[in-house]
Image: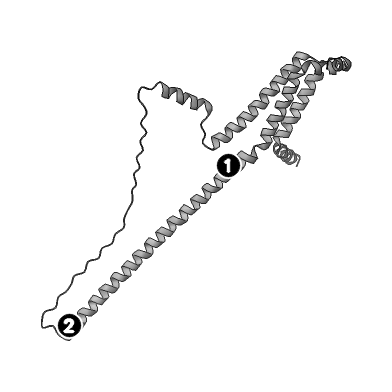
Amino acid sequence: MFKKFIITKLDWARGNQLFWANAALIFATLLILWFPGPSDLRIRLWGMALQLLGAFTVWHDLAGAARDFGVTGIVKRNLAWVKRGFRNKSPVNGSAEIILGSLASSSSGTVRATLHVGASLEERVSMLERRLRQVDDAAVKAQNLINEKERLLRQKIAQLEQSLVSKVEEVNLKLKTAVVGSYPVLLFGAAWLVVGIVLSSVAPEVAKSLEGEWVQIWRNL
């Protein structure tokens, strides 16, 4: 029971990792500001570290969104550009497309019986019936072939439609993730980037204010 409770709470805690990251950075910032005492250099270095963390977070999120849309990284793009510059021959881009298809064909052969000149009426009627049966069989085969072609075509259309729907849903999910889903991460990086800039810019004043030298700071303004 207790183990299940711990696992449940851990799953709950992992559901908002940015909260714990913010809490850890706030605690570390307060610790650096006050322990063992205010230090201009330590505050400035911590501010620089926060700037680097914020910049890396923003860059990493944007780079991940770019990779999801198939955009080549800046390093690979520049390496490819350098390689193109040192090639003696211009690359020739060729593409070949081979389409293999199968055509279904049906053939039916009939042996046409001939009547002699003096054939009786019964023989002529019998011959006519046989030919009508052959025509009927050919019509049935043609209809069956048409129905089979129609079934295969509808099946291919349904598969293509399902594939297109899946692709559209995948693109919509990527767009949502790129535009909205990364907002908390970008906000996290931007916020700590601002904190780092402030600490680095006014590190001496922050250190003096923590030592209670408000009057001197006010006079320097």
Image point (77%, 23%), residue name? 29
Q: Which quarter of the picture shows residue 94?
A: top left
Say whether residue 88 is left or right of residue 199: left
Q: Is residue 112 visible?
A: yes
Q: Looking at the image, which is closer to me, 66 or 219?
A: 219
Image point (33%, 51%), residue name? 101
Looking at the rendered structure, the kind of residue marked 2 is Glu
User: Badge 1: how crowded within 10 Å, few (<14), some, or many (20+)?
Assistant: some
* Quadrant location of the N terminus in the rendered image: top right
- Here the colouring is one colour
Say whether residue 73 is left or right of residue 151: right
Q: From the image, tell me which residue sits under label 2.
A: 123
Measured along the vertical axis of the image, is residue 204 above or below residue 186? above
Measured along the vertical axis of the image, is residue 6 above or below residue 135? above
Name the N-terminal-most of marks 2 and 1: 2
User: Badge 2: how crowded within 10 Å, few (<14), some, or many (20+)?
Assistant: few
Cα–Cα span, label 2 and label 1:
76 Å
Q: Looking at the image, which is closer to me, 90 or 118?
A: 90
Q: From the image, tell me which residue sits under label 1.
A: 174
Q: Label 2's element?
A: helix
